[in-house]
Image: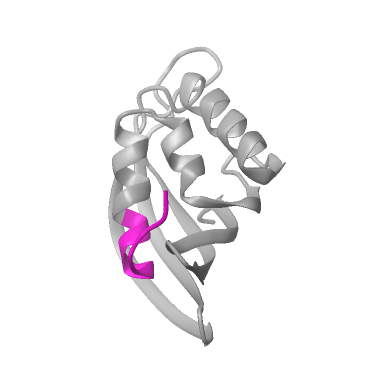
Amino acid sequence: MTVAAPEQLPRAFAAAWAVRDAKVIAALFAADADLLSLTGHWAEGRKEIAETFASELAGAFQRAKLVTGKAKLRDLAPGVTQVMQRFVLSGILNPDGSDAGRVGAILSAVLVEGPGGWSVAAAQFTAEA
């Protein structure tokens, strides 16, 4: 799955997160993409990315909701764009099952344009300080 334009990535990512569909999230990534996840896991390739999101969405983020905030797009070269999207996450679970509260997170993704649309080549999904 690709997106028709880079600005569609945050909404597509949040929609797949809302239904806990790690395969749909991973489908937004190129087959050989890299991801540094919110929990600090480095995944290489769509299969590992799907496994990482599946694990995270079944664990600490099983009830977490994403709310989109500020976004910024920067064209880096023809057919290459960086998307910076701020999210607020709520419903995160601590290891003991208690609510961890709300946190801010940034998805920084480099998208490349291909014949079928835009896909993520590399991304970091990190907590705000």
Please give left or right for residue 115 compared with residue 7 in the image: right
Residue 110 falls in which quadrant of the image?
A: bottom right
Please give left or right for residue 39 compared with residue 98 in the image: right
Outermost top residue: 96
- The one nearer the camera, 108 or 5, is 5
Residue 73, horizontal then vertical, whole percent: 40, 77
Outermost front residue: 115
Residue 53, horizontal then vertical, whole percent: 53, 33
Q: Does residue 121 sit above or below 82 in this rendering?
A: above
- The colour mode here is one colour
Question: What is the magenta range?
Answer: 1-10
- The one nearer the camera, 67 or 35, is 35
Please give left or right for residue 95 compared with residue 99 in the image: right
Residue 52 falls in which quadrant of the image?
A: top right
What residue is at 50 percent from the left and 68 percent from the top?
114
Q: Does residue 36 sit above or below 118 in this rendering?
A: above
What residue is at 47 percent from the left and 33 percent from the top?
23
Q: Does residue 105 sit above or below 38 in this rendering?
A: below
Q: Quadrant of the C terminus?
A: bottom right
Residue 2: in magenta span: yes
Residue 4 falls in which quadrant of the image?
A: bottom left
Q: Does residue 118 sit above or below 43 in this rendering?
A: below
Residue 11, horizontal then vertical, whole percent: 29, 53
Residue 44: in magenta span: no
Residue 62, horizontal then vertical, whole percent: 41, 22
What residue is at 35 percent from the left and 56 percent from the top?
10
Q: How many marks?
A: 0
What residue is at 50 percent from the left and 73 percent from the top?
82
